[in-house]
């Protein structure tokens, strides 16, 4: 009898779902259902650069077939599995390529993005407005927007800024990792204590156009001064909370506290070192180890072997989607639920947090927040409603300003007293 009882208990354990597993499945189904009716808008994906940099066929959009499982983090099947409703495709170019010409490479990246959007009309569609996002979502297409990463691409020209807007760019990250002639970058030496007068004029012209001011990558001084100047909501297309992880790329609480007045949105990113202090510290240690190894003058093969040995002795810390959820919770707590969004940086990071490895995994993050007690109303704001509201405010401001302001003809030489002839 005792053996029979044990057998029945074991059989029941096999047939009945584990309580935690059942709850997880319920939360995940809830998340997927919610994202079927609310567009998930991701603020930053580097697919265009991934296509440019592919080894086998650089810049060949056809060769990087999104109908197949790609070597990166993004393809059509996984976009659909992840319930992505709209995507800002980053048209990033490095700020260190001055000898090649910023404008040429930027135009090539816009061309790559527009090519892959046009190549899959049953899955992607180019949009430039909040209404366009919602119309695409109703047609079950990923509304595809273009976001420029790094103000170096305008080459100190407001005319170039307007030309990029006409090509479809709907946000400009004021800097990347290099301080500009008119704005300080977070990860470079400050030269201006924030924005120069020309930098402020760039923001005013972006407001007039209806191009979102993106403050990811800029110094805290630029963040603060941009909030002083901008008459439209700003965004952080891929940043997290500095109070939790003291990384230069993250947003201080002092800035989060100012977002309600501006209407802006922090789109929390998945970059492991931005959401995990142990990971940030490990990356700094790895960089220092690499510098020390290179300083010995070892040849490339020996240096690589030494670095592999260092990594074996210092395992990479574990980072999970719960770390990302912690940052989302913090932005919600400090700035308010109306000012938080999602900005993955997929295909711009070598490895995502555990549970957020590629674009198929967005519902898992929402399931985690459901388990933490987030309401459907708040989840919809996080998914996309906050960004749609910010876009509509920026569009309305632009319509007003265009009736009052002519395109600015100000130059950096005139405003800052720098450049040729000064």
Image (cartoon, rainbow, N blue to C red):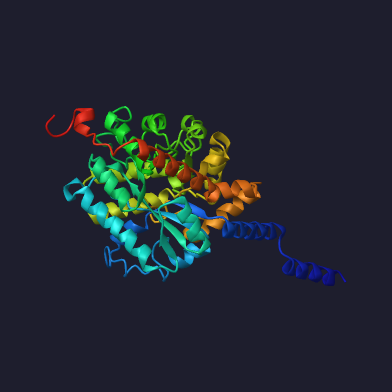
Residue at the image position 26 percent from the left and 42 percent from the top: 152
Q: Residue 277, image x and y in percent?
A: 47, 40
The residue lying at 52 percent from left, 40 percent from top is 339
Where's residue 405, x and y in %?
Answer: 33, 36
Report whether 193 appears left or right of 43. Answer: left
The quarter of the picture where the C terminus appears is: top left
Q: Nearer the viewer, residue 320 or 99?
A: 99
**Near-viewer residue (276 or 341):** 341
In the picture, the quarter occupied by the N terminus is bottom right
Q: Position of residue 14 (x, y in %)?
A: 72, 69
Q: Depth check: give the residue in front, 339 or 64.
A: 339
Q: Where on the picture, by quarter, is residue 54?
A: bottom left
- Say which of 399 and 49 sits in front: 399
The answer to which image quadrant residue 232 occupies is top left
Q: Is residue 299 left or right of residue 283?
A: left
Q: How many marks?
A: 0
In this view, which residue lies farthest toward the left?
421
């Amino acid at each position: 009898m005792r053996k029979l009882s044990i057998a029945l208990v074991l059989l029941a354990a096999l047939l009945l779902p584990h309580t935690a597993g059942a709850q997880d499945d319920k939360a995940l189904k809830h998340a997927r259902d919610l994202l079927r009716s609310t567009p998930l808008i991701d603020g930053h994906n580097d697919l265009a650069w991934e296509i440019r940099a592919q080894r086998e066929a650089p810049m060949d959009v056809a060769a990087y077939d999104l109908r197949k499982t790609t070597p990166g983090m993004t393809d059509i099947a996984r976009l659909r599995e992840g319930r992505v409703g709209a995507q800002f495709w980053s048209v990033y170019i490095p700020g260190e390529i001055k000898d090649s010409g910023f404008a040429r490479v930027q135009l090539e990246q816009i061309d790559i993005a527009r090519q892959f959007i046009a190549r899959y009309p049953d899955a992607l569609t180019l949009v430039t407005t909040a209404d366009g996002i919602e119309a695409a979502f109703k047609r079950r297409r990923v509304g595809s927007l273009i976001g420029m990463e790094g103000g170096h691409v305008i080459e100190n020209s407001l005319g170039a800024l307007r030309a990029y807007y006409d090509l479809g760019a709907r946000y400009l990250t004021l800097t990347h990792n290099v301080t500009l002639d008119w704005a300080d970058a977070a990860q470079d030496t400050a030269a201006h204590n924030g924005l120069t007068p020309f930098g402020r004029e760039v923001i005013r012209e972006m407001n007039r156009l209806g191009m979102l001011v993106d403050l990811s990558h800029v110094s805290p001084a630029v963040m603060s001064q941009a909030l002083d100047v901008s008459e439209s909501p700003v965004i952080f297309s891929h940043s997290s909370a500095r109070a939790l992880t003291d990384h230069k790329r993250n947003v201080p609480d002092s800035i989060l506290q100012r977002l309600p007045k501006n209407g802006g949105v922090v789109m929390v990113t998945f970059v492991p070192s931005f959401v995990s202090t142990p990971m940030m510290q490990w990356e700094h240690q790895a960089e220092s180890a690499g510098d020390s190894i290179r300083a010995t003058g070892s040849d490339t093969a020996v240096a690589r072997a030494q670095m592999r040995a260092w990594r074996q002795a210092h395992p990479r810390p574990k980072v999970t989607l719960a770390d990302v959820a912690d940052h989302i919770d913090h932005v919600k707590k400090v700035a308010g639920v109306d000012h938080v969004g999602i900005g993955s940086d997929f295909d711009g990071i070598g490895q995502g947090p555990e549970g957020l490895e590629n674009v198929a995994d967005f519902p898992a993050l929402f399931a985690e927040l459901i388990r933490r007690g987030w309401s459907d109303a708040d989840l919809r704001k996080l998914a996309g409603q906050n960004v749609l509201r910010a876009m509509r405010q920026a569009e309305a401001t632009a319509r007003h300003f265009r009736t009052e302001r002519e395109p600015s003809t100000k130059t950096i030489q005139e405003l800052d007293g720098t450049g040729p002839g000064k």
